[in-house]
Image: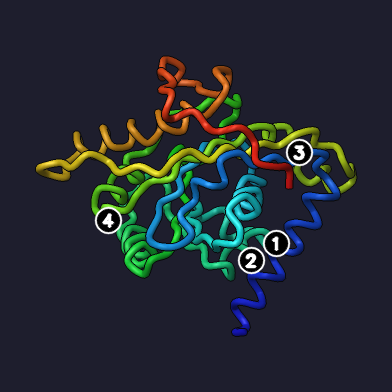
Amino acid sequence: MSFLDAYKKAVVGLDWVANRVYVRKFEVVGKENIPPEGPLILASNHLNNADPPMIVLAIRPRYPTFMAKQEMIDWPVLGFALKHFGAFPVRRGEADRAALRAASDVIESGGMLVMFPEGTRSRTGGMTQGHPGSGLIALRSGAPVLPVAITGSEGIGWPWIFLKPFSVKHIKVTIGEPFQLPPVERINSEATAQATDIIMRRIAALLPPKYRGVYADTEVEREAAPAEAKGVY
């Protein structure tokens, strides 16, 4: 086992322990929808800085690579763990070509790229407008997109959470079915905006109405609805 593999297993182990200490119930729905291998873009809503560790637990045994905002990568603890777990930074509000190249490299190598298309955590709990970068990466790569919805993490307060064991009542990670974006003749701003809207609405379809925010008018299709919970982790 390489040092990197050992490090990743150690991080996941610490993540699991912290989850057991602070979260009363951690529920994962639709785990069977995760392809066991191959290139994949996981797109999720974003409520709290605790969302990345929750995703890591929900999708194991696959190891993801995170596209994270520059500020998060610079944090002393979580940032260190994310960076050495394979995360790379993206500068929000800019055409960050280095981040786009890094995202393409992850997907071309058969990895799982995790993105939070909103760019930052929601302050209200409801979804905010997705940034077009997610649609652009999905269109360029042609990789399937795995929609994921998180609820319950919005109440976690930093750093006070460390003083309050079992204070988080219930975190739920709902994993939808992977899908392909429809092909486009030309990848331009209109196509990327439409692709991002499709991705965001797939996520919204997995969320309770109060979490859908600007995508509140999303109609939940039967095939997009998740199966019953397979277990509590």
Marks 4 and 1, how far apart at CA: 32 Å
Scheme of colours in the image: rainbow
Left or right for 97, reference 88 = left
Left or right for 133, reference 169 = left
- Residue displayed at 56% across by 32% down: 122
Task: Please give the label number shown on residue 77.
Answer: 1
Report the residue marked by disc 4: 141
The amino acid type found where label 3 is placed reads Gly
85, above or below 48, in the image: below
**Mark 2 and 1 residues: CB-CB less than 8 Å, in contact?**
yes
Q: Quick one: label 1, few (<14), some, or many (20+) residues within 10 Å?
A: few
Tell me residue 9's x, y (percent): 67, 70
Query: Circle 3 sits in a helix, a strand or a loop, which is it?
Result: loop
Between label 4 and label 2, give the one nearer the viewer. 4
Tell me residue 124's x, y (percent): 60, 24
Report the residue marked by disc 2: 80
Looking at marks 3 and 1 on the same chain, the residue that comes earlier in the sequence is marked by 1
Left or right for 13, reference 94 = right
205, above or below 30, in the image: above
- Residue displayed at 66% across by 36% down: 172
Task: Please give the label number shown on residue 157.
Answer: 3
